[in-house]
Amino acid sequence: MTKNKIFTAGDNNPKSRSDCFVSLELKKNGGITVNLKSKVESLYGESILNLCRKELEFFGIKNAHLEITDTGALDFTIAARIEAAVKQAINTDKDFLPEILPENKYSTEKERFRFSRLYLPGNTPKMMLNAGVHKPHGIILDLEDSVAPDKKQEARFLVRNALRSVNFYGAERMVRINQLPAGLEDIEFVAPHYVNLLLIPKCESAKQIHDTDAEMKRIRKKYGFDYPVYYMPIIESASGIENAFEIARASENVVAMAIGLEDFTADLGVKRTKEGTESLYARMRLVNACKAAGIQPIDSVFSDVGDEEGLRQTVKESKMLGFEGIGCIHPRQIAPVHESFAPDKDEIAKAEKIIEAFNKAKAEGRGVISIGTKMIDPPVVKRAEKILALSANYPV
């Protein structure tokens, strides 16, 4: 007798937390049966079973056996794991979407501080749940390097559901897609669900940005949303560095550009050092390209989680070079990064002069704002306001 094929998704490690493992077997008859093993079965068992039946019914599955081993997963994770298994089993265009949190419907701003961005593996829900509590300026739900190749499709459903269901407490919601062209497929999973910014890894040419724009245009037309979705290309090769300026200017949606030093130094065939001599040219060229294009330059991650003093020194050097943010791989890095990137006395004094000139011009009914002979544009005033607001949280 031929056995039915079994479709699986999720984490099968019993030591994992806030996740589940599902296996789905389609049958010719017998209705729906669900076998649940859960650490929280006594409290939420009936609720989990109802979700399972509701989702299978949504996809039109009438005869199947579903096995779930649960280690405390929230509904959005369970739903994502089931959907990943279902879409291996049947061909369907339907999406089982959790209700979106009202606070996740906000749009980001082109001009905002991006001192910190916290990387979160896109297939590990436990790391997503409290990420916003640590107050990073941005969280990155990563579909690229942190996700195993055979888990990338599962991760798409999980990241999509997290964008709708997890409260990140005002952090800019970023997704690092896969390297293009594969990353173009990721965009449809996240763009219609209030993602704020796409990180485009291993970017080497303006064409990759143009391709992203074209895909975004198609998706906007299909789903009918109008909120902005910005881009942060990540430059990780010698070719990318040489093309940095054209990449920075490739689209009005590019608001920042980052450098990835692990892949960059590997491309050069050299070892990444703490001093960073081997990457100084690349970092300075990227900063210059960003400043010329009017976008934010963002530095690479600092990989030694236990070295806070080294992190502070690196951020100090980054700021001196002109960088306006850095990547974080652990929540404990966020506070030192914010404190080190926070405005110094000179920046605060300059911002105060700008706001004083703005208020004076406004009181006198003048549309032109100037300090001495230098004209002040509205974006400069807005940034000065943000600097003063930020200085209140990080007093000098």
Image: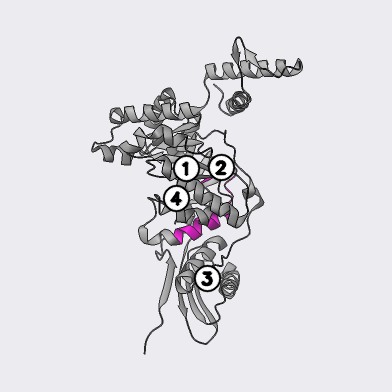
Q: Is residue 377 above or below residue 190?
A: above
Which tag, 3 or 1, sits closer to the chain's start? Answer: 3
Q: Is residue 389 left or right of residue 322?
A: right
Q: Is residue 152 above or below residue 35?
A: above
User: Residue shown at 55%/42% (left/top)?
Assistant: 172
Q: Are marks 1 and 2 in contact (CB under 8 Å)?
A: yes
Give the quarter of the image for residue 269: top left
Which tag, 4 or 2, sits closer to the chain's start? Answer: 2
| Quadrant showing the C terminus | top right
Element under disc 4: loop
Which tag, 1 or 2, sits closer to the chain's start? Answer: 1
Residue designated by label 1:
118
The image's mark for residue 171 is 2
Give the quarter of the image for residue 301: top left
Element under disc 3: loop
Indicate which label's residue lies in the foreground, 1 or 4: 4
Residue designated by label 4:
177
Element under disc 1: strand
Give the quarter of the image for residue 332: top left
The image's mark for residue 92 is 3
Q: How far apart in space, not on screen, are marks 4 and 2 (Cα)? A: 18 Å
Which tag, 3 or 4, sits closer to the chain's start? Answer: 3
How busy is the neighbourhood of tag 1: few (under 14 within 10 Å), some, or many (20 plus)? many
